[in-house]
Each structure stands twice: as structure tokens, then as C-alpha cells.
Image (tube, helix red, strand yellow):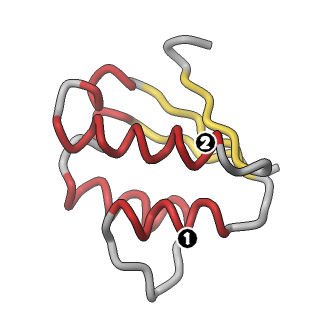
Amino acid sequence: MEIILLDGARLCRREEAMELLDRALALPNWWGRNLDALYDCLTGMGRPTRLVLRRRRAMEATPFGSRLLRVLRDAAQNTPWLELVDEETG
């Protein structure tokens, strides 16, 4: 299983978040750098992946971060090979 560490404090602003996610998840060149495309990429990866989220509360404190967190949670909930682990809640 691939384990990817995500720092919620760096996922609060759209531009920085999309750049970090692009690199961390090795997303395809065609992805649209928006939340809908991110969801599609996450649910279509097909490889066992665990996303470990640190500093979630920093994400929740911003409008973009809270939307991104919803996308990550929805993708993990609807995809058997994708797991989201929140270090703040265990």
C-alpha cells in the first residue's frame, strides 16, 4: 500500500494545494487542477493508497480547505482502495 503524507496547513489555498497534490499523488497531466478533477483522479487511481492527513484543523479553518477535505473524505468513502487517515482523530 502506498502511504502519502499530507500537511493540512499547506492545503488551505487552492494554488498551493493543487500543486502539492499534483506532486504527492503523481496525478496525470490531463487533470484539470480543480476539485471535481481531483475526485475523479482519486477514485480512478486503482492502486491501494493511504492518505495520512496532518493538521486537518488548519484546512477546516479556510473555505477552500474545508471543501478540499470534503472531497478527500468523499473519495475515500466511495473508493475501496483509498483510505484517509486523520492524525488528529486517529
Across and down, in percent, residue 25 comes to 55, 62
Residue shown at 31%/67% (left/top)? Answer: 34
Res 63 quadrant in image = top left
Residue shown at 47%/41% (left/top)? Answer: 6
User: In the structure shown, which secondary structural element does the residue marked by tag 2 occupy?
Assistant: strand
Q: Residues within 10 Å of mark 2 (few under 14, many from 20)?
A: some
Task: Give the spatial CA distance, label 1 vs label 2.
Answer: 13 Å
Which residue, given by chain and number where applicable, does mark 1 sit on? 26
Q: Is residue 3 above or below residue 87?
A: below
Tell me which amino acid carries mark 2.
Answer: Leu
Residue shown at 39%/25% (left/top)? Answer: 56
User: In the structure shown, which secondary structural element does the residue marked by tag 1 occupy?
Assistant: loop
Q: Is residue 15 above or below residue 7?
A: below
Which residue, given by chain and number where applicable, does mark 2 sit on? 51
Tell me which amino acid carries mark 1.
Answer: Ala
* Residue nearer the viewer, 2 or 79: 79
